[in-house]
Each structure stands twice: as C-alpha cells, then as structure tokens.
C-alpha cells in the first residue's frame, strides 16, 4: 500500500477523480478498507482482468480477496442499494457476506428521502444531485429524527419512522404538491430488507481499533471530493457530508491518523450544477468526454470538463492535510495537442490569493492559464523512464504548482496501468 499502517485516499476535485481505481490498487496489500461518509451517490469504477465493476456503497477493497471491508456509521445507508450490490458481487463469485461489516449506527436512506430529493430537483432550487435521497437522509440525521440501521433490526421502530415521515410528507405535500409517502409501504420496504442486512451488522469502530492495534494495514476510502465537501466545497453546490480525510475519525469512530493520498484527475470534471471556472467546450471538451468516457458512474450524466485547476487543488490539499497526489487519466489528457493548467484566478481585475469556497464568488473568478504541449498516445509504460517527456514535464509542473509530490501515476483504466512515481514500480 504505502508503507504506512493507515492511509486515507480522498478526492481532490468534484468527485470522479478515479478513486475506485486507485483505492483498488492501493488495497493490493491492505487488510482492511473502510468507507466513512457519503452513500450510494458514489460511483467507484474498478477494471481488473478486463472486467469492469462499478461500486456505489461497498468499499472497493471487496475485489481483493484478502481485504475485509467496513462501512462506518458516517455513511448513509440505502439497504436496497446495499443488497443489490452484494448480490451482483456474490453472483460474480466474490464473497461479500463473510468479508463485509456494516455499522448499526448508519442513518438509513428510505423511500421518502428519495421522493424528497426528486421533488426538490424538479424545482427551481435544483443543484443537480444524484437523486439518491442522500441530502434528505443527512438532514434527518442532523435533525435527530433519522432511523439508524440498528433501529430497524428486530423491529419496534414505528415511532421513529413516524417522526421522519411527518417531516418528509409535510414538505412533499405543502412545498411540492406531491402525494405523501404511505407509512405502511415504507414499513414493508424496511422489513423486506432488514433481516437480510442484519447478519452484516458489526461494531465497525471496535473492529478497526483491534486491526490498528494488531498493526494491520487499513485504507480509508472517501467518496465524492473536497470541492463537494459540505463545509469546504463550493457551497451550496455540494454533497451533504464531509469528504475530507479528517471526517474519517467521526465516520468510523476511530481516529487512525492516516497518511493522506489525494486523488486528482489530470484535468477537471464536474457533474451537477455549480461554478466551474476552468470549464471548456468545443473540440478539446469533446475529446476528453469521448476518450475519457466522462459519464457519471451513478447517474450516467455527461460530465462537464475543464482544465486542471491549481487554486482549487491547493485548497483541497490544504483542507485534507495532504502532501501527496495520485494523478489519473494522463493517457486521456495527453491526446490534446495543447493542454492548459489554471495557475491562478483574477476577480474584478485583481489577482486572488486563495480559492473562494462560496459558489457565488467562484462564479466571478477568471482563470489564468499556462499552456503546455500534449504527449499523444501513451506508449507501453513499464516504469517512470518510459513516460513521454512532455507528460513528465506536465507532472512536474503540477507538483511544483501544487506544492505537493505527485507520487502515483495512472495511465489507463487497468490495475497494471498504475505506478509509484518515485519507486518506479508497477503493481498489477
Ligand atoms: P448528492 O450527493 O446526490 O446530494 O448530490 C450533490 C452534488 O454532489 C451533485 O452535484 C452531485 O452530482 C455530486 N455528487 C455526489 N456524489 C458524487 C460522486 O460520487 N461523483 C461526482 N459527483 C457527485
């Protein structure tokens, strides 16, 4: 993995940086992989042995036989999504039941949360969510009316469900003119699933504390990215959880003090609405979308694309306490004749010293660019010495501008197309 007992792999952009791929690769010698926030809004894609697997809830470590996987109480849990994903993996011959623990403290995503998310997204206040009910489920948790997984195992949760539904139905009926959600249908929905999820419930925090004390390697898997973080992202066009490394302690119930690896795509993408200062259109955008297959793994929406944004990356690195970057999709960016990197912003004609986290301010930022040449089709790369010179210059420039070491390069979707830069070692 990284030589450290615990590593957190986090997104440094607006999600979709290639976290699934890098986490699967780092998990090659990890014993545990743990998700600590988000829900099934995530879409982590792993390509191994020519097989593509998209995971939304179960940690990417599930594809590594020796890994035990954990879902901490910071994750909001849609039991149906969990069971569907577990079934898909079990059908492919992957043992989930024996290798996955889920915290009973996870707040549940229920049908009325999905109904609320959909109703809000059909109005003028839409922000382009994944419509998976993630925001409303987090609101119930913060509002202290959430049903947690442990509440529904064994039944007797009617009062809590009534409190959550009262809230949701009031908004559905009075703000959106929608039919209220019938409590009986939600009870049936829950009861049909809770008994199947029950065997997975475990004390995730205690398991991870024991693993740490035994010196076993633990990998924390973040979803989304720092620029979508509810505190540190381009608010209000953000997700509802904190996606940065420090959220791992609260979301798992154990502070593992991880070494942080930030994952960034060699260019930028964003799905959903919100400011995107380096967004581009035209031929360059078409190439990136087509060659980079820039379509959301969860909602299949086409991603918006743009140039790498250094002020945003510096912000993401700072809030994560991260000094190390895994740079992905270099094979895609290099196909352009000329590539640009945003090195700073100007606002109202004046240079801006830092990334303005609020969306309104970000909308008014004018990016300033440096241009570099592309490097064409990526050759077979066995070690750092085989990387095209123009690509190596790009990587060096990113490192210098960000003030962080680029330590991992990803040059294609397969596991084998990944390497430690300084160790010059390709892992399959
Ligand atoms: P929500 O998380 O579904 O509430 O969506 C809030 C914002 O986060 C929207 O812009 C989504 O497109 C974005 N988002 C949520 N999860 C992901 C992800 O895994 N990758 C990229 N964007 C995401």
Image (tube, helix red, strand yellow):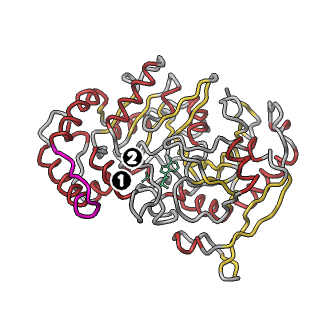
Q: Which residue is mark 1?
A: 117
Q: Earlier in the sequence, mark 1 or mark 2?
A: 1
Q: Tag 1's secondary structure?
A: helix
- Whether residue 174 is in magenta: the answer is yes
Q: Respond yes or no on whether mark 1 lies under 8 Å from ligand 1.
A: yes
Can residue 427 be seen by looking at this rendering? yes
Q: Which residue is mark 2?
A: 132
The stretch in magenta equals: 173-183
Instruction: Please state, as top left, top right, bottom left or bottom right, where the C terminus lies in the image.
Output: top right
165 versus 87 height, above or below: below
Q: Quadrant of residue 311?
A: bottom right
16 versus 383 height, above or below: below
Give residue 28's position: percent from left, percent from top.
58, 29
What residue appears at the point 69 percent right and 82 percent down from the top-left corner? Answer: 350
What residue appears at the point 60 percent right and 36 percent down from the top-left corner? Answer: 21
What residue appears at the point 70 percent right and 69 percent down from the top-left corner? Answer: 367
């Amino acid at each position: 993995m990284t030589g450290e007992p615990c590593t957190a792999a986090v997104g440094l952009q607006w999600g979709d940086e290639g976290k699934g791929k890098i986490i699967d690769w780092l998990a090659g010698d990890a014993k545990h992989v743990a998700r600590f926030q988000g829900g099934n809004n995530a879409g982590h894609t792993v390509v191994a042995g020519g097989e593509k697997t998209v995971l939304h809830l179960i940690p990417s470590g599930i594809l590594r036989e020796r890994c035990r996987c954990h879902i901490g109480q910071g994750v909001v849990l849609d039991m149906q999504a969990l069971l569907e994903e577990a079934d898909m993996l079990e059908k492919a011959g992957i043992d989930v039941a024996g290798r996955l623990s889920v915290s009973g403290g996870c707040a549940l995503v229920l049908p009325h949360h999905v109904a609320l998310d959909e109703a809000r997204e059909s109005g003028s206040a839409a922000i382009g969510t994944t419509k998976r009910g993630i925001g409303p489920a987090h609101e119930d948790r913060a509002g202290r009316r959430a049903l947690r997984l442990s509440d529904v195992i064994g039944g007797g949760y009617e009062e809590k469900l009534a409190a959550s539904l009262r809230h949701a139905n009031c908004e559905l009926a009075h703000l959106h003119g929608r039919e209220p959600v019938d409590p009986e249908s939600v009870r049936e929905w829950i009861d049909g699933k809770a008994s199947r999820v029950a065997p997975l419930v475990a004390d995730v925090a205690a398991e991870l504390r024991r693993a740490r004390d035994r010196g076993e390697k633990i990998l924390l898997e973040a979803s989304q990215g720092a620029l979508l973080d509810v505190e540190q992202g381009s608010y209000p066009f953000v997700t509802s959880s904190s996606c940065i490394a420090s959220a791992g302690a609260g979301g798992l119930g154990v502070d593992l003090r991880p070494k942080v690896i930030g994952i960034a795509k060699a260019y930028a993408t964003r799905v959903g609405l919100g400011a995107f200062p380096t967004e581009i259109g035209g031929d360059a955008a078409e190439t990136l979308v087509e060659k980079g297959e820039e379509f959301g793994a969860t909602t299949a929406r086409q991603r918006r694309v743009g140039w790498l944004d250094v002020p945003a990356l510096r912000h993401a690195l700072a809030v994560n306490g991260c000094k190390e970057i895994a740079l992905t999709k270099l094979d895609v960016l290099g196909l352009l004749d000329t590539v640009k990197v945003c090195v700073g912003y100007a606002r109202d004609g004046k240079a801006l010293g830092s990334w303005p986290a609020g969306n309104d301010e970000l909308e008014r930022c004018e990016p300033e660019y440096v241009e570099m040449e592309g490097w064409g089709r990526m050759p077979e790369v066995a070690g750092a010495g085989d990387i095209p010179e123009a690509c190596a210059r790009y990587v060096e420039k990113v490192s210098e501008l960000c003030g962080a070491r680029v330590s991992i390069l990803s040059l294609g979707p397969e596991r084998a197309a990944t390497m430690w830069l300084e160790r010059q070692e390709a892992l399959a």
